[in-house]
Image (cartoon, rainbow, N blue to C red):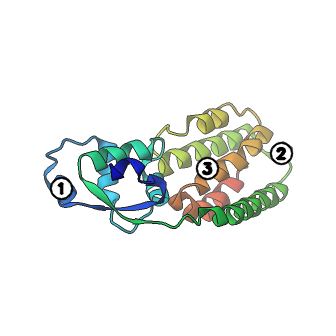
Amino acid sequence: MPDQVLDLSRSVFAKTAVGQQEVQTRALKLGPLPRRLLILVDGKRSVSELTGFVAGSDINVLLTELLDKACIEATAVLPASAAPKTPSAEHKSSLETDLVNYFLEKLPDASTRSAKEVEMAKNFMMNTVNTIFQPNTRLTLLESIFACKTVQDVRNVYPKWTDTMNASAIGARRMPEFREKLLQVL
């Protein structure tokens, strides 16, 4: 079967007539995540772009379900030039790390921050994660933030929080705003 050998990660999908019908009638009784993914499939977004909308779930399982029910079909396969993108992704990661370090170096001495400011920073970080991603889908990060007792603990979690937020298109777009607000109390 061609669907079984299809490289889902490099494919672009579009709704079929069955998929269009399902969006309007809900006849197939799809769960919330497959339905969300079906609605978002537009023949333009790549699988990597769609992944951000179903964070915490295996997109391959969801795509396979939609393919099996004939709700979507592959309309294009992106070239295997993902390998050349890796160095630039590493370069981008290096730049982001430098940026994180730059902001951390500019912060005031940790001893100047009160316990209230530590709590405010922790709450802000947890709230932004739960706003950008589905609530409680980034449990490891949320647990790390919750476990912070001192300003330095929160500052140690800051790079991981930044990486997580930048993993989402919405989070990356709003990162300057989030960073500005967080650094006022961090």
**Left or right of residue 110: residue 135:** left
The Cα–Cα distance between marks 1 and 3, rounded to whole angstroms, is 35 Å
- Residue drawn at the location 70% of the way across and 66% of the way down: 88
Q: Nearer the viewer, residue 32 or 77?
A: 77
Comes first in the chain, label 1 or label 2: 1
What amino acid is found at the position of numbered circle 3 in the picture?
Answer: Thr
Residue 70 % position (x, y): 23, 51
- Mark 3 sits on what residue? 164
When asked about the image quadrant of residue 141, the answer is top right
- Residue drawn at the location 52% of the way across and 67% of the way down: 79
The Cα–Cα distance between marks 1 and 2, rounded to whole angstroms, is 58 Å
Q: Which mark is residue 136?
A: none
Q: Secondary structure at mark 1?
A: helix
Residue 114 % position (x, y): 76, 41
What amino acid is found at the position of numbered circle 2 in the picture?
Answer: Ala
Foreground: disc 1 or disc 3: 1
**Left or right of residue 30: residue 92:** right
Q: Which mark is residue 110?
A: 2
- Residue drawn at the location 35% of the way across and 53% of the way down: 2
